[in-house]
Image (tube, rainbow, N blue to C red):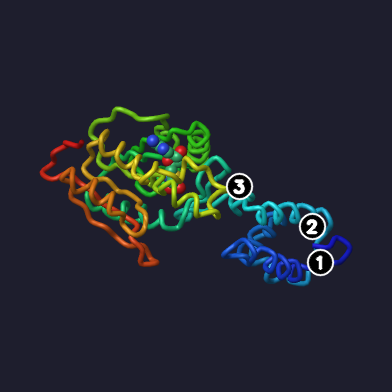
Amino acid sequence: MASNRVWSVKSVLDWTTKYLSEVSGSPRADAEILLSHVMKRNRLWLYTNFDFVLPHDVLDKYREAVKLRHDGTPVQHITGEKYFMALKFKINDKVLVPRPETEELVERLLMDARVSGWKRFLDVGTGSGVISISIAKYIPDAEVWAIDVSEDALNLTRENAERHGVSKRIHVHKGHIDLKNIDVVVSNPPYLTEEEWEILKELHGEPIKALVGGEDGNDVYKEILQKYSPKRFYFEIAHPFRKSLQRLFDENGLEYEIFKDLSKKDRIAIVWRQNGTDTFS
Ligand SMILES: C[S@@+](CC[C@H](N)C(=O)[O-])C[C@H]1O[C@@H](n2cnc3c(N)ncnc32)[C@H](O)[C@@H]1O
């Protein structure tokens, strides 16, 4: 982006869209989000001010942001925020950028929880706290335990819970926790295999611990199933529903239902123990 020419909103967005298309699947959206972030305006403003000439200080900040994006940093790590379930969350490079597919998991859980009257939830691998905080916001008398192995993630969960006014009902805890009478364990665990992670270079800007669940991708599912006995497990899963995960459920006599996301990909597993037994090997 040459610094000796005049850049309008439109010309800078057009230039950036082309430049970021080398590395991003959504270059136009990335360019608009970054420009509205540095200008402290919403995206609609950009469209109604295409001819606005960008001042030098804005251009300098924008240039830096575009360079980071071109080098592989996710847009949300640059802006430091992401909307999830219509709530605004603080995000940083220590946590996974929340995905729209995970909103579908939460929507299904909220729907079932309202019908069943579930009030006590455990969120394993809470990251920025998006699942826990959405549950606490949309079920006003819910109690949620939010756990993670990452202290950085837990700090962010605390901060986001505070921002949304639900910190009294979100119990943040590092590592596993001994809990009785939990209605639901919900988790979007790290579920990529090591081999998949190697191939998916576009994910390398996010923490590996948030993405990879051991050699077969199932490590955290195993831990959860061994440690907890809720009425239901709500899991996000990889697509296609992995044979090894299916085997894990089958060999342990678990019942389950698999649901697809809006892109018709296997994405949600609702799992429960037959006859309320809690054996697991
Ligand atoms: C895929 S991210 C999910 C973050 C957030 N829940 C979301 O949906 O956006 C997985 C999270 O699990 C955490 N994690 C990894 N191994 C774990 C384990 N054994 N027990 C608990 N949390 C774990 C990671 O630190 C990471 O924050």
Q: Quadrant of the N terminus?
A: bottom right
Which of the numbered marks, if any, corresponds to residue 7?
1
* Residue matched to label 3: 80
Mark found first going from the N terminus, 1 or 2: 1
Residue in view at x 58 percent, y 43 percent:
93
* Residue 12 visible (yes or no): yes
Q: Mark 3 belongs to which amino acid?
A: Gly
Mark 2, residues whose alpha carbon is within 10 Å: few (<14), some, or many (≥20)? Answer: some
Marks 1 and 2, how far apart at CA? 8 Å
Which residue is painted at 13% across and 45% down in the image? 274
Residue at screen point 62% across, 53% down: 72
- Mark 1 neighbour class, 10 Å CA radius: few under 14, some 14 to 19, many 20 or more: many
- Quadrant location, ligand no. 1: top left
SS type, badge 1: loop
As helix, strand or loop, the secondary structure at mark 3 comes to loop
The kind of residue tagged 1 is Trp
Q: Are marks 1 and 3 in contact (CB under 8 Å)?
A: no
- In the picture, measured across the screen, residue 193 lies left or right of residue 26, that is left
Residue 191 image point, x, y percent: 39, 47
> Tags 1 and 2 in contact by the CB under 8 Å rule?
yes
The location of residue 279, given as percent across then percent down, is 16, 36
Residues at badges 2 and 3 in contact (C-beta under 8 Å)? no
Report which quarter residue 202 is drawn in. Answer: bottom right
Residue 170: where, in percent of width, then height? 40, 36
Q: Earlier in the sequence, mark 1 or mark 3?
A: 1
What amino acid type is highlighted by mark number 2? Leu
Task: Give the class, few, some or many, for how many residues have Cα within 10 Å of label 3's Cα (few <14, many ≥20).
Answer: some
Task: Return the residue at label 2.
Answer: 59
Q: CA distance from mark 2 to mark 3?
A: 19 Å
Q: Is residue 165 above or below residue 82?
A: above
